[in-house]
Amino acid sequence: MPALIPPSRFYELLSQGKFPLATFLRRREHIDYIEEPDLFHEVFGHCPLLTNQSYANFVRQFGEAAVRLGKGYSWHLFRIFWFTVEFGLINTPQGRRCFGAGIVSSPSEAKAAMDGTACEFRPFDLMSVLRTPYRIDIVQPIYYVIDSFTDLEAIVEQDIGSMIDKAKSLGDFAPAFEAKAS
Ligand SMILES: [Fe+2]
């Protein structure tokens, strides 16, 4: 995927308060969903939320933790990012809303997440997130829901390295999806 940069470079930029953006634009046939980030996903999905101080703090501190922890933790760190910044939902006084850029930049994913009949919503819990496998090429069967953007800051205040070590020893939850056909 040419629009993706290596994880170490991605995390390094986040730790510097920089959010790298893919600059290509999806073609019409990919209007509903594309596995790679494109300019629409970045600008429509991520940029508005980067003006939220708690979200921005989380992204930066997440990058710092990832740089500190190094490669052996990458896989689990992606899960945190996936279930928040990319596919997170948030409870609001008006009801549950999507904030993950992967949801808001995909019409069918947004419809599925708001409709809620074919997916499961779980309260955000870091240990559970760390043990939840995901696939990037399907509408998500499981979403994690935060109550406030300050919940994101609470994630990076924890000892993420120890949490990942524990998650590894406990093992993954059974996948809520079929294995990808190879
Ligand atoms: Fe993204």
Image (cartoon, rainbow, N blue to C red):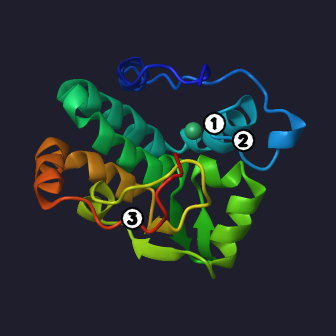
Is label 1 in contact with label 2 (beta carbons under 8 Å)? Answer: yes
Viewer-proximal residue among 180 and 34: 180
Instruction: Tell me the amino acid under the disc marked 2.
Output: Phe
Q: Residue furthest bottom?
A: 117
Three-letter amino acid code of the residue under disc 1: Cys
> What residue is pinned by disc 1?
47
| Mark closer to the observer (1, 3) | 3
In the displayed structure, does residue 171 sit left or right of residue 32?
left
Where 168 falls versus 110 (above or below)? above
Residue 146 can be seen, yes or no: no
Q: Quadrant of residue 97?
A: bottom right
The alpha-carbon separation of the residues under discs 1 and 3 comes to: 31 Å
Question: In this rendering, which labeled residue sits more in front, label 3 or label 2?
Answer: 3
Q: Tag 3: Cα neighbours inside 10 Å, few (<14), some, or many (≥20)? A: some
The residue singled out by tag 2 in the image is 44
x and y percentages locating residue 65 in the rendered image: 25, 33
Q: Position of residue 174 (x, y in %)?
A: 32, 67
Dot 1 or dot 3: first in sequence order is 1
Q: CA distance from mark 3 to mark 2?
A: 30 Å
Name the residue carrying label 3. 175
Q: CA distance from mark 1 to mark 2?
A: 6 Å
- Residue at 19%, 59% in the rendered image: 171
Q: Is residue 16 left or right of residue 50?
A: left
